[in-house]
Image: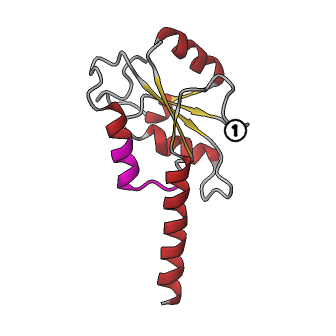
């Protein structure tokens, strides 16, 4: 599954891994990068943030990006749907569902939770304005 997100046609849900596979991938790719987020509402700015994280990286897949999907305070989508949404992004190579919170080993991840929560709140406010306006 090396370079899963690198233009290979496949069911992107195959990019979703369990804890054991995530550990194998971490061992196989010491330079792997990690990002945590809710992936509950996805907007273009979030994709651009992810693209900036990997810009200038080796295109050979030697530094894959794993998204660790954590639970927001009040999710709009269920955890599996959020993981599938993240897996559908070409910039993300692997997705780990962190149902019990961030894994203890995850100390060097870029956190996108604040950005994701802000986008979620903006969407809710937008919908309320449209419904009451």
Where on the picture, by quarter, is residue 49? top left
What residue sits right under mark 1 in the picture?
A: 99
Viewer-side residue, 24 vs 101: 101
Viewer-side residue, 42 vs 11: 42
- Based on the picture, tell me whether residue 80 belongs to the magenta stretch: no
What is the magenta range? 40-49
Q: Tag 1's secondary structure?
A: loop
10 sits to left or right of 94 = left
- Based on the picture, tell me whether residue 42 belongs to the magenta stretch: yes
29 sits to left or right of 98 = left
Query: Residue 32, image x and y in percent?
Result: 45, 20
Residue at the bottom extreme of this rendering: 133
Q: Is the magenta stretch mostly helix, strand or loop?
A: helix
- At 49% across and 60% down in the image, what residue appears? 119
Query: Residue 2, image x and y in percent?
Result: 40, 17
Query: Residue 8, image x and y in percent?
Result: 31, 27
- At 55% across and 41% down in the image, what residue appears? 83
105 sits to left or right of 30 = right
Residue at the top extreme of this rendering: 28
> Looking at the image, is 128 positioned above or below residue 46?
below
- At 36% across and 53% down in the image, what residue appears? 45
108 sits to left or right of 43 = right
Query: Residue 120, image x and y in percent?
Result: 53, 61
- At 64% across and 17% down in the image, what residue appears? 20
Graded by Cα atoms within 10 Å as few (under 14), some (14 to 19) or many (20 or more), the crowding at tag 1 reads few
């Amino acid at each position: 599954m090396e370079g899963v997100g690198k233009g290979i046609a496949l069911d992107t849900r195959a990019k979703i891994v369990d804890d054991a596979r995530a550990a194998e991938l971490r061992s196989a790719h010491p330079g792997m990068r990690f990002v945590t987020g809710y992936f509950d509402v996805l907007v273009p700015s979030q994709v651009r943030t992810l693209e900036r994280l990997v810009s200038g990286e080796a295109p050979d897949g030697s530094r894959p990006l794993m998204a660790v999907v954590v639970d927001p305070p009040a999710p709009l989508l269920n955890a599996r749907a959020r993981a599938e949404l993240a897996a559908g992004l070409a910039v993300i190579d692997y997705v780990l569902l962190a149902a019990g919170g961030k894994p203890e080993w995850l100390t060097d991840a870029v956190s996108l939770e604040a950005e994701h929560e802000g986008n979620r709140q903006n969407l809710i406010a937008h919908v309320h304005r449209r419904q009451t306006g």
